[in-house]
Every structure is written in C-alpha cells, then in structure tokens.
Image (tube, rainbow, N blue to C red):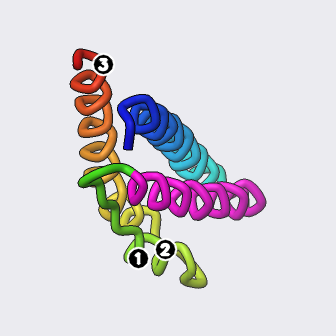
C-alpha cells in the first residue's frame, strides 16, 4: 500500500474512533437520563462504528482490532454499559494512539 493510501486510511480510522467515542459518550448520558430512544440510537451507532473501525484496521498493515466481544455485548437484550467500557475503552484508545503514531511516522518519511 502506498504511503498516501495508508495515511488516508489511518486518518479515516482516527476519525471513526473519534465518532465512536462520541457515541459512547452519548450512550453514557442517555443511560443516566434513562432515555430509551437515545440509548437504542447510540447502541446502533456504536455497532456501526465498530464494524467500520474493524474494516479500516484490516486494510492497514499490521493493524488488527477484534470486535467480537463488543458486538456480542451490543447484541444482548440489555447491554451492560460497564462491560462495554471494559471491552472498548482501552483497546480503542490503544488503536487511536497507534494510528496517530503511524501517521506521524509516515508523514516524516
């Protein structure tokens, strides 16, 4: 993959992660407010973004991101917010940092 294509995919990945984190924040607020419609919408958005992040990470050399556990939790009848945070917060942040580091490295080359 050329550096330009890889940079583009990395930038898209960082953007998708930013949107995912916003969706998780909305889910947190919606749970606190007990707003069932917003909760359902946020869960759908998280599901979609996780799938997009997995696709993008598979297109980038040496990047992998497993979403199976998170998707299983999202598909349960009552997803647990604490479990979702445990499954996503650390790995998503690590992926974001790795993508930003790779963007910097490729930009310097």
3 or 1: tag closer to the N-terminus: 1
User: What count of labels does the image hold?
Assistant: 3
At label 2, counting other C-alpha atoms closer than 10 Å, the crowd grade (few under 14, some 14-19, many 20 or more) is some
Query: Please, is residue 30 above or below residue 106 in the view?
Result: below
Residue 64: x percent and y percent? 30, 60
| Residue at 22% over, 25% down | 105
Label 3 sits on residue: 107
Q: Residue furthest front?
A: 2
| Residue at 58% over, 52% down | 27
Residue 58: x percent and y percent? 39, 59
Q: Which mark is residue 68?
A: 1
Residue 36 falls in which quadrant of the image?
A: bottom right
Viewer-proximal residue among 38 and 91: 91
Viewer-proximal residue among 12 and 41: 12
* Label 2 with label 1: CB-CB less than 8 Å: yes
Q: Which mark is residue 81?
A: none
3 or 2: tag closer to the N-terminus: 2
Label 2 sits on residue: 71
| Residue at 36% over, 50% down | 60
Q: Is residue 84 magenta?
A: no
Viewer-proximal residue among 70 and 95: 95
| Residue at 57% over, 80% down | 75
Query: Please, is residue 63 above or below residue 99 in the view?
Result: below
Magenta region: 34-59
Question: In 3D space, how far apart are the residues under numbered discs 2 and 1 (Cα atoms)?
Answer: 5 Å
SS class, disc 2: helix
* Label 3 with label 2: CB-CB less than 8 Å: no
């Amino acid at each position: 993959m050329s550096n330009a294509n890889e940079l583009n995919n990395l930038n898209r990945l960082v953007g998708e992660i930013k949107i995912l984190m916003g969706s998780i924040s909305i889910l947190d607020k919606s749970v606190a407010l007990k707003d069932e419609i917003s909760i359902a919408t946020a869960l759908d958005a998280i599901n979609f973004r996780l799938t997009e992040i997995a696709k993008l990470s598979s297109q980038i050399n040496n990047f992998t991101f497993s979403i199976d556990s998170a998707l299983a939790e999202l598909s349960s009848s009552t997803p647990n917010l604490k479990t979702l945070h445990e499954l996503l917060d650390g790995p998503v942040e690590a992926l974001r940092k790795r993508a930003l580091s790779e963007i910097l490295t490729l930009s310097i080359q």
